[in-house]
């Protein structure tokens, strides 16, 4: 298995929340993370129907364009009562289109959509959910690996906390009382789906 050596590594994401989390996780390993956005790399269209496919697509594109190893994350919220939705389309649920065609992401809108669908199923609906994360690492020579992680939890309403991003304010991880949006970032990093996947990546790539 190919190993990462200290030096520059592209984080193939334009999501600043994700970039911050991955940069913090990489800090102990001598890597110099740079975001795809800071390198003006385009965001490839996520045409995959699985987390693995989309993560590999993003990492491959960034590695090809930058000539550097690239790490991509594809993650999402999986709600049991909604047959696994939003799942691989987690970010799409937050998207709105302006009159000029510009796409923006409104995570409050996305959280409200989840809540509305749960409420439509009645007061006794299960609120069990999990976050899943796939990390894909691709080198410019085409070598690659991927790792998957997850964290179980329950959805709450209304949203609580402003420390996270995405659906964090409505997700309480199993065994805890705070949402990811209320948790100190270090506490979240210790138990998150991304941390679970990253631990597996470290074991394989360092």
Image (cartoon, rainbow, N blue to C red):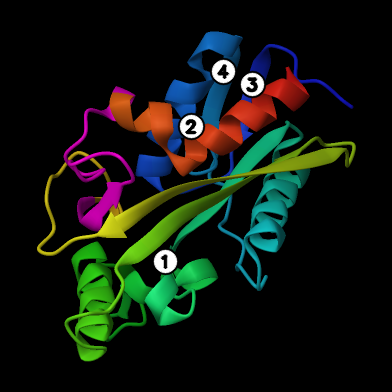
Which image quarter is the C terminus in? top right
At horizontal 58% and vertical 31% (from top left) the residue drawn is 198
Inter-mark Cα distance, 3 to 1: 27 Å
Q: Is residue 184 located in the magenta-colored stretch of the structure?
A: yes
At horizontal 66% and vertical 67% (from top left) the residue drawn is 50
**Looking at this view, is 40 or 192 the one in front?**
192
Q: Which of labels 4 and 2 is toward the front?
A: 2
Q: Can I make out residue 103 in this image? A: no
Of the numbered discs in the image, which one, if any, rests on residue 22?
2
Inter-mark Cα distance, 3 to 4: 4 Å
Q: What residue is pinned by disc 4? A: 32
At horizontal 26% and vertical 43% (from top left) the residue drawn is 180
Inter-mark Cα distance, 4 to 2: 11 Å
Q: Is residue 165 above or below residue 84?
A: above
Q: Which of labels 3 and 1 is toward the front?
A: 1
- Asked if the residue at tag 1 contacts the one at tag 3, i.e. Cβ–Cβ closer than 8 Å, the answer is no
Q: Which label's residue is closer to the chain start, 3 or 4?
A: 3
Q: What residue is pinned by disc 1? A: 91
């Amino acid at each position: 298995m190919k190993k990462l050596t200290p030096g520059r590594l592209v984080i193939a994401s334009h999501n600043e929340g994700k970039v911050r989390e991955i940069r913090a996780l990489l800090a102990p390993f001598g890597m110099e993370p740079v975001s795809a956005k800071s390198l003006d790399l385009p965001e490839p269209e996520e045409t995959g129907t699985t987390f693995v496919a989309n993560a590999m697509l993003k990492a491959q594109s960034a590695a090809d364009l930058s000539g550097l190893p690239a790490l991509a994350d594809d993650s999402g919220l999986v709600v049991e009562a909604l047959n696994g939705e939003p799942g691989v389309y987690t970010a799409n649920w937050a998207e709105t289109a302006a009159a000029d065609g510009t796409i923006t992401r409104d995570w409050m809108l996305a959280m409200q959509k989840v809540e509305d669908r749960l409420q439509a199923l009645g007061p006794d609906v299960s609120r069990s959910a999990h976050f899943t994360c796939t990390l894909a690492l691709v080198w410019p020579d085409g070598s690659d690996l991927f790792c998957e992680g997850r964290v179980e939890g329950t959805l709450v309403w209304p949203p609580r906390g402003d420390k996270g991003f995405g659906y964090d304010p409505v997700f309480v991880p199993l065994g805890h009382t705070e949402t990811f949006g209320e948790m100190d970032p270090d506490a979240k990093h210790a138990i998150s789906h991304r941390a679970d996947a990253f631990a597996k990546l470290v074991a394989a790539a360092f």
